[in-house]
Image (cartoon, rainbow, N blue to C red):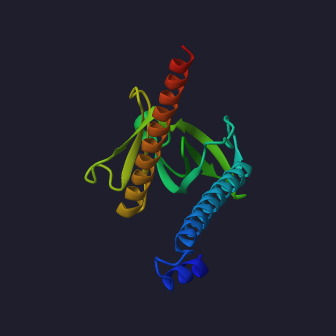
Amino acid sequence: VLLLKDCIKHMTPEHPDYDNLNRALDKVLDVADYLDHERAKAESVNKVLAIQEKLSGLQVKLVEPARTFIKEGSIIVDKSEQGGSSLHCGYLFLFSDLLLECTQKASGRFKVQNTFDLGDIKIVPLPPETKPNAFRVLSKLGEAHTTFSTSSKGEVEAWIGAFQSAIFSLKKSDMQRRVLSENRRMAQE
């Protein structure tokens, strides 16, 4: 890439190879972008596999073609409003379509406590005066919820931003799938 850019930089637009070198540079940049994208996909699959190996109690297949890893971290789980034991340390794994609420074992492994489908939940930030640095995961029907707290305002904002981005992307890809399916159906008629 650098060599092509350097050649083009020292060449006048009238040179017979100028256009060909520019096209070659565009193609090389396209290939580099493609390779970067594929490398990132492979790294994401490896990350999901590594997480899957650390989990017990998982009721779903974690490795799926469209599933990518987004974020993980320690969190405080508050189930006191549901009659459960009040506060305990938890660990979240956020994927492109799924949230896993876990507890960490002494061995470094994780036990899955809850699995949330991102298409079926809503994230609600809680007012700082009520519960500082907290957000609630609600089922779309509002029947069940879990409250999570972090150690700082920046951390809760990072989690909420990651959730919002993942949910938006999931809705967008679902919409694209529906449009493609409808287009195929209409083409067959």
Spot occupied by residue 100 in the image (x, y as percentages of width and height): 57, 44
122 or 31: which is nearer to us?
31
Give the vertical position of 173 relative to 140 (above or below): below
| Residue beneath the point at 45% across and 39% down | 172
| Residue beneath the point at 28% across and 54% down | 128
Spot occupied by residue 170 in the image (x, y as percentages of width and height): 48, 40
In the rendered view, does 116 fall on the left or right side of 61?
left
In the rendered view, does 156 fall on the left or right side of 51?
left
116 or 8: which is nearer to us?
8
Spot occupied by residue 91 in the image (x, y as percentages of width and height): 56, 52
169 or 28: which is nearer to us?
28
Q: How many marks?
A: 0
**Residue farthest along the top direction in this orientation:** 189
Give the vertical position of 11 relative to 177 (above or below): below
In the rendered view, does 59 fall on the left or right side of 121?
right
| Residue beneath the point at 62% across and 62% down | 31
| Residue beneath the point at 57% across and 74% down | 17
Q: Locate the N terminus and report the quarter of the image it occupies.
A: bottom right
**Residue farthest along the left direction in this orientation:** 129
Give the vertical position of 178 relative to 70 (above or below): above
85 or 54: which is nearer to us?
54
Spot occupied by residue 55 in the image (x, y as percentages of width and height): 69, 47
Q: Locate the C terminus and report the quarter of the image it occupies.
A: top right
